[in-house]
Amino acid sequence: MAPRRLLLVGEGNFSFAAALSEALDSNSCLTATCLQRLADLSQDPVAQENLQRLRRRGAEIRFGVDCTQLADAFEPHHRGFDRIFFNFPHCGRKAGVAKNRQLLAKFFQSCADVLAEEGEVHVALCRGQGGTPADKPQREWHNSWQVVAMAALGGFILSDVHPFSCEAVPGYRCTGYRSQDKPFHVEGALSHVFTWSLPFESSQSRVFRIKLGDQWFSFLEPEALVGKLSRNFLEAPSSHPVRTVNEIFLAALGKAFPLKRLKCSSPLLTQDHLSVLSSWNWDDASAAFGICLHEEHSSAQSQNGGTAQDMEDFVMSFSELRFPKSPERDGKKEVPEAICGQAKFCLRPSLLVHAQAAIQAPDFTPGFLYTLSGPVFRKCRILPFTMPAFHEALFIYGINPNAKDGCLQSLLDLLKDTVDSLLARAWLEGSELSHSVEFVLQPNGTDYRICVKSHSFGSYCAKDLTIGAVTTSAITSILPKDQCFVFVSINLDLLAMLVWGISDWRMLWTFDDRFLNNFVPGKIESFKNYSLYPPCYVHDISFWLDEEKGFDELEFHTVARAVSQDTVISIEFLNRFQHPKTEQVSLCYRLTYQACDKALTQKQAAAMQLRFRKEIQRQLHVQPR
């Protein structure tokens, strides 16, 4: 085991350093620092005694160290600390919250120069100072030190918070309250543990390739889906929770029905496939992400890679769902009509588009349960449980019309038992919610919504969440008249969130390894979030509408999702104004920015908002005010 290197900054009388040094094992190296010079402590007998204790333990002691300039205090070969501690930071005397925020901001930025890759920064604050919900009572944000926002400036996220106990550090006496030899009020104090965040990088769409016939074509992923194509969460040996949920479902259903797994084909479709969805009254078919293919002249290009800049001339095709009129642009050919005719391409919004091919396959056998799982993509409004990409499981069951009711009920009972079993395991593993599954009959009298009702323990709170659907009426126009089919669709992402207690769907798509480290194969236990109470930033925007162009609110949400890298968590309509003279209409919305797994700063959110203003003007033809 490599030695742990600990750095203490802002020590007053060194009592914390002395007590900590005696609790460390021989594999730890302690460096204790303070802002004062050694001569400034010569008249403090407590400090002198603690310094002697530290020297006897072999600790390194440094004086005159500014915690906001740590790179100046430590040469490059002396950096790489595993833990940095700063207890009860304060600018001194009657400094207000603004100055103390500035101290924290500079401290965290300084830590970025000397902290190891997997290191932690521990900051102890008095009750209420941090401004997070962990404080009891919680101060208003503007009256707090906004510790999570200040940490974001250094690239850190809050990963843990727990009570600070002086009793746990025998001999510790915190001093320096208002630059005096007086202790801080530590009752209700909290220790905040910060870790590195993945960096916020510019959103760059990747280039993907697909073979049609004997020709290769390339397309650029939509900006709103960056990082969500070709993640292979459902493939072995992935330990992703959506795969675990899918495999549990298949194992349970396979015990009651003969099961056949269908191979998940490419998510790229012609828009003609979407006509299948209209018969299921699936009203989001028009919200599919459009794709435009371009012929490649060299098969040596990488399968995925490149940047949006590499294929800049392709970008315009995504919002149009049509091919440019010119067959050739900058030397790049569009998909030849021999292959696509007048077809428009898109990413599949549901696996139901594959149902017709499965049913009409020569080896399709009634009585077997056919299953298909894969990612689907759709434009949607920004809401807590709506997602532009998720993993769907589709089950197709062909039955004898004369035995329809009995077979359907057997399938529904098994589905309910399987979901109930999954959610019960989560409850036994310490989930704060209990759940119940209901099948809600739809107005047509034949279809059902699969609904999970959540009940909190203690104070009652219940909410319904639709995780899937059951239908016998889908694609009836192409079904054999003497057969009946049941189609079951399950949103695996939503189900995984319920089972593991994951509150934010965006966490399922993170690139942070700490997410998957939460999951142990064969075991379900509550997800431990490593990014607590991330800061929020609110921006309003108002704009004039172009009467001729109209306004598409769904595209408004999609543009916000794209330019913010999915950090916009809500869009609230505020008001509509019509000019009394010109009769021109203006709309006003409020956007809330908050990352779930990265350190988002106020400056970054402001830059995203500025780009959002430009993009809605360019793409939606509105005029920001």
Image (cartoon, rainbow, N blue to C red):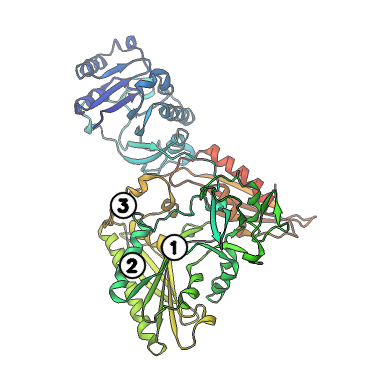
For disc 2, the neighbor class at 10 Å (few under 14, some 14 to 19, many from 20) is some
At horizontal 56% and vertical 63% (from top left) the residue drawn is: 213
Q: CA distance from mark 1 to mark 3?
A: 21 Å
Horizontal relation, residue 143 to residue 427: left or right: right
Q: From the viewer's side, name the closer residue of 215 and 392.
A: 215
At horizontal 55% and vertical 77% (from top left) the residue drawn is: 279
Q: CA distance from mark 2 to mark 3?
A: 18 Å
At horizontal 22% and vertical 33% (from top left) the residue drawn is: 168
Task: Answer above or below: position of 505 versus 246.
Answer: above
At horizontal 36% and vertical 54% (from top left) the residue drawn is: 240
Look at label 2 and name its amino acid. Answer: Phe
Q: CA distance from mark 2 to mark 1?
A: 14 Å
Look at label 1 and name its amino acid. Answer: Gly
Look at label 3 and name its amino acid. Answer: Phe
Among numbered discs 1 and 3, the one appearing first in the sequence: 1
Q: In this figure, which residue is indicated by the disc labeled 3?
A: 519
| Residue 529: image location, x then y, percent | 36, 47
Q: From the viewer's side, name the closer residue of 179 and 562.
A: 562
Among numbered discs 2 and 1, the one appearing first in the sequence: 2
| Residue 616: image location, x then y, percent | 65, 51
Among numbered discs 2 and 3, the one appearing first in the sequence: 2
Q: Nearer the viewer, mark 2 or mark 1?
A: 1
Q: From the viewer's side, name the closer residue of 599 and 489.
A: 489
Horizontal relation, residue 40 to residue 509: left or right: left
Q: In this figure, which residue is indicated by the disc labeled 2?
A: 249
